[in-house]
Amino acid sequence: MKFNKKSRGVVSAVALASAAALVLAGCARTVEPSPGITDTEITLGVISPLTGPTAGPGNCTVDGLKAYFGAANAAGGIEFGDGKTRTVNVEAADDVYDPQKALSNFQSMKDSVFAFTSGLGTATNRAWREAAIEDSVPQVLIMTGDPIFSNIEESPQQLGFVPLYQTEGSAFGELLAASGSDHKVAILSQNDDFGKGYVEGFKSAVEGASNIEIVGELTYEATDTSIDAQLTELAGTGADVFFNANSQVPLVSNALLKAQEIGWLPSWFLPSNTSSPAIVGPNNGAAYPGVYSTVFSKSPASPAYAEDEDVKTFLANMEEYSGVTEIAFPHCVWSYQVAATLEQVFQKMKEPTRENFMIELRTIADFEAPLMLPGKTINTTIDGQSAISDVQVVKFNGAGYSPAEEF
Amino acid sequence: MFTTLLSNRWIRISLWVALAVVLILAPLSLPEKTNQTITQIAVFAVAVLGLNIVMGYNGQINLGQIFFVGLGAYVAAWGVTQEWNIVLVFILSFLVPGIAGLIVSLAASRLKGLAIAMVTIMLPLVGVPLSKRLEEFTGGSQGIYAGFTTPPDWSGLARDQWQYYVVISITVVVFILGANFVRGKFGRALEIVRDNESVASSMGISPYRYKVLSFTVASMFGGVSGFLYLAAISYTSPETMSFVHSIGLIVAMVVGGAASIVGSLLGGAYYVLIPQITNAINPNLTAVFQGIILLLVLFLLPGGLVTLPAAIRRLVQKMKKSEMSETHSTQDSTKSVTKDSSLKK
């Protein structure tokens, strides 16, 4: 760029003035708090299915948060990194698992909510992911194993909480491949990202293992009311391991009974959200050589943890602050752990801004959240992984689950 | 008095102009959320309008309208990700559902009543798993993000304002087309076919042809709604065409007012606003409150929200009448008194 003498003078004057303005602005810098936070309160938003077919787990994503923060508020609130003590409000909205309603809820709430968290669902969370990025609103520790939410480059305002579906599938695959003995595997998966994620993880783990042969692979729809036909066909393959990537509790219950009825008794693998002892026990899971799953948290329904201090506190808080007495879904435990993780972030936050929140959110490592299994921790610092990336393969023991070191 | 005013052509025209000016200026001063809500209302009003054409005006039970909305959204999303010209994408997004609707109705419109309802139920039931499997087109169950409503630099508008203009301008055109379609020759033919097919046949109107026509037009409107859905939401997934939403559209049509153009608009407003309102009341009881509101509307206004002005007018007239009859009766009594006195003379 060429300037003549006169205009050069003007340019330098302008440059000087703007430099001075910048310096002055820097001196007078006060941090403007983000929406949803004051000196005494912070508001979190949850967009989940609270009515409709997925209402059970959906309500749990709110109840766990309310239980944890209810107790924290009753104790006087949480001291943030900026020295101020704040109480935490949880505002929930129902999306009925409809992406349009989820986006509409986000649009309604984004000016009154500091950060969105704990919401359940892949499609519903995806529906407003781009909008959250555009408006720089946090959408963190959400209940989906979809990897896109845990990729910093693609999702700078997001982070998943539960393990990626792939992580769970591959943990079991590794255990199986390491067994040394020959196994024939039959795979049944839900026709969506959930089922595909598990199968992808499993296959990548057994790839190249000469002792593992996949002898049958079928799918079903999440809306199906029966998977008997698939079970019968897979039983015909003579597989001794049944990898059932199924997120529907009634279908898992029926399948456990149906396979016994037709005399097919393989070892089972079930995902963490459909393998609770309350499902496997009553349907005679003990009839099989083994029912395997992956876990990272304690199961409050399991008799093994009846005397556990963590579990006792959790159950008491759930009853007092959420009015829930029966923990039917693991999502209640998970959202309780989400709340504990958020508390860690709050304690580190130096400024009441979403920007600072997102920075501190990604610094939590080796955090032993309440209800975590011994040795399992929350780690938000690994790009490409959700907050929980370390899972334990466990085996059903008739009453609850115990760690499975070998197949 | 109001109707005589409206019968003046110039007053009518100036009212339309005023409405147009309000529609154009409103988004510049309204809050972001209001613009977004109006935009979403327009999206579903177009879907309800399509449903009204096939069901309200023509009497064919269509439980699959959401399938055409979903299909239109997928076609639009596919076109956008392939970076095709947006006008071409728009045309395809109603042409493809239109052709699908034509094929379905060629078979389905031979059926009557519950049978055609069953055929149309099948559309979303097949559509959801199918869209999960056709992953390279639809993105599978994770859906497909395809935003094309980023405001151009020259406009100086925010995203919500640009989305509003895109969606509202298409909606206005579609509603004018829809209104013209259901009036005049076609509209009368559709209603005769709905009310009595034998009468229609004896008048030289082929019920079959008109049923296919209305079903196809409705599917095209569904497709337009799908395009608008993508313009407003920027994302679509198999959940978009879930069967429950088809029922939601029918409820919206009945609540708004069947066989009514304005009713379609009100239906769209009902579809979008009620979940927002019930969420504000109690997020855990949205379904319960939606049921209560639906029942209230149907009990108080069986013809839908569109009959509200007529209902109010009836009420006012009733009150006037009772007032009048009261004054009449007092006049009568004075008359009779004078009569009596005259007799006495």
Image (tube, rainbow, N blue to C red):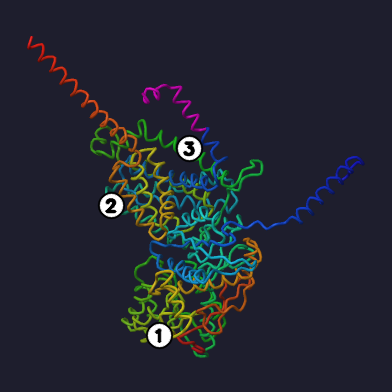
Q: Chain of mark 3?
A: B
Q: Chain of mark 2?
A: B
The quarter of the image holding the C terminus of chain B is: top left
For marks 3 and 2, the one nearer the N-term is 2
- Which residue is farthest top? B345
Around disc 3, counting alpha carbons within 10 Å, would you say few (fewer than 14), some (14 to 19), or many (20 or more)?
A: some
| Secondary structure beneath label 1 | helix
Q: Chain of mark 1?
A: A
Q: Which mark is residue A16?
A: none
Around disc 1, counting alpha carbons within 10 Å, would you say few (fewer than 14), some (14 to 19), or many (20 or more)?
A: few
Q: Indicate left or right for B285 with A131 as reference.
A: left
Nearer the observer, B184 or B336? B336
Is residue B14 on the magenta stretch?
yes
Q: Position of residue A54 (x, y in %)?
A: 41, 65
Question: Residue sitting at 61 percent across and 55 percent down?
Answer: A134
Q: Position of residue A259 (x, y in %)?
A: 35, 80
Hey, what amino acid is under mark 1? Answer: Pro
Q: Position of residue A19 (x, y in %)?
A: 82, 51
Is residue B308 on the magenta stretch?
no
**Is the same chain shared between marks 3 and 2?**
yes
Question: Residue sitting at 52 percent across and 45 percent down?
Answer: B35
Hey, what amino acid is under mark 3? Answer: Val
In space, the residues marked 3 and 2 are separated at their CA atoms by 34 Å
Region of the chain picked out in magenta, as a range:
B1-20
Hey, what amino acid is under mark 2? Answer: Ala
Q: Which residue is mark 3?
A: B172
User: Of helix, strand and loop, which mostly describes the magenta segment?
Assistant: helix
Q: Which residue is mark 1?
A: A303
- Residue B202: image quadrant is top left
Q: Indicate left or right for A15 with A157 as reference.
A: right
Q: Which mark is residue B115?
A: 2
